[in-house]
Amino acid sequence: MVRIAIVGAGRMGKTHSGIVKQLPDAELAGIYDLSAKASAALAAEHGTKVYAAPEEIIADPAVDAVVLCHPTFAHYQALRLFLPSGKYILCEKPMVRHRGEAEAIRREPNAATKLAIGFMRRQQPGYQKIKQWLDDGTLGTVRMVKMGCNVAVYKRLWDDWFADFALCGGVPLDMLSHHFNLLNWYFGMPCQACGAGLMFDRPMEQPVDYISGSFVYANGMIVNIDGSWQRQGVGYDRIEVYGDHATALYDQRELLLCRPGQNEKVDLGQPVAPYVEQMKSFVATVAAGAVPAIGVEDGYWAFRTADALIESAKTGRFVTFED
């Protein structure tokens, strides 16, 4: 039985704690949040204990793993605190907020063997099938990719940390981290990034965030990506991968394999809940004492990709990636 403590009693804390309670081979050890009221409410809902401080989790020998669900700007401090304990950690994306923090966490003892990052889209059959097609040559040489994730009912206001670019990193770091991780999984790192955006640090009546960018790869492949938190309109979430032999189109509902004169809808089987599958994988990793399949390097390079696009959008210059 893997015993898991949850840090953060907000939206994702509620999501992950509910999933842990469903799994037969996991147990919810307790809840910690800066708000004692929020901790108590979530702990009471699940019949578990409240931790008064993170140090109590570290000192509890019955806790095997920790899930970090609190705000992005608090991830670095929490990771520096928990990693030396040797407990497994599942950290919600993005891994951290700043470049220096990403570099430091990458060097932390236990980061390479105990830290998992919550890129749950890697659990979705549609994205997994595209990865298979890339690896087995079904798509042929990929020339271009179009990717977008636009949320059309954004309701947060200026007094929310999630509407403070300095704290959350806005749409490129927070939401598109998932997509950058997918691109890095598929193609490795790009060579250059360029972008433009409307970000939270620009004055506007209500928070609206939009970024559009391009990545260029060593083989000449181009990826165009856009993302937004907008207050009205039509949202979408899709990827289009254009290869010499075929094109893959996935929009969260269906996957198409397109060849000249033929668009084939691909059977993805029964729908899966990616957060549930992610937690199952994490629990199995902890139980086996294994290295997380989606770990600190994934978190680091997804951050670097987002950070490059942000830098280009702010400066108006191409940004070149360096190790």
Image (spheres, rainbow, N blue to C red):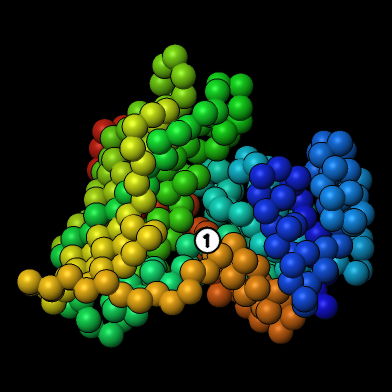
> What amino acid is at disc 1?
Phe
Expressed as whole percent of the image width and height from the top left, the position of residue 311 reads 37, 39
Tell me which corner region of the image, top left, top right, bottom left or bottom right, holds residue 226: top left
Indicate the quadrant containing the N terminus: top left, top right, bottom left or bottom right. Answer: bottom right
Q: Is residue 299 above or below residue 156?
A: below
Q: Is residue 10 above or below residue 282?
A: above
Q: Is residue 215 left or right of residue 80?
A: left
Identify the residue under disc 1: 119
Q: Indicate left or right for 172 with 107 as reference.
A: left
Relative image position of residue 117 (x, y in whole percent): 58, 61
Residue at 38%, 69% (x, y): give it: 126
Q: Quarter of the image containing the C terminus?
A: bottom left
How would you rate the neighbour count of disc 1 (Cα within 10 Å): few for under 14, some for 14-19, many for 20 or more? many
The secondary element bearing badge 1 is classed as loop
Q: Position of residue 103 (x, y in %)?
A: 55, 54
Residue, x 52% and y 61% (percent of image)? 119
Task: Indicate left or right for 52 with 226 as reference.
Answer: right
Name the image quarter holding residue 263.
bottom left
Query: What is the count of numbered marks?
Result: 1
The reply to whether residue 85 is visible in this rendering is no
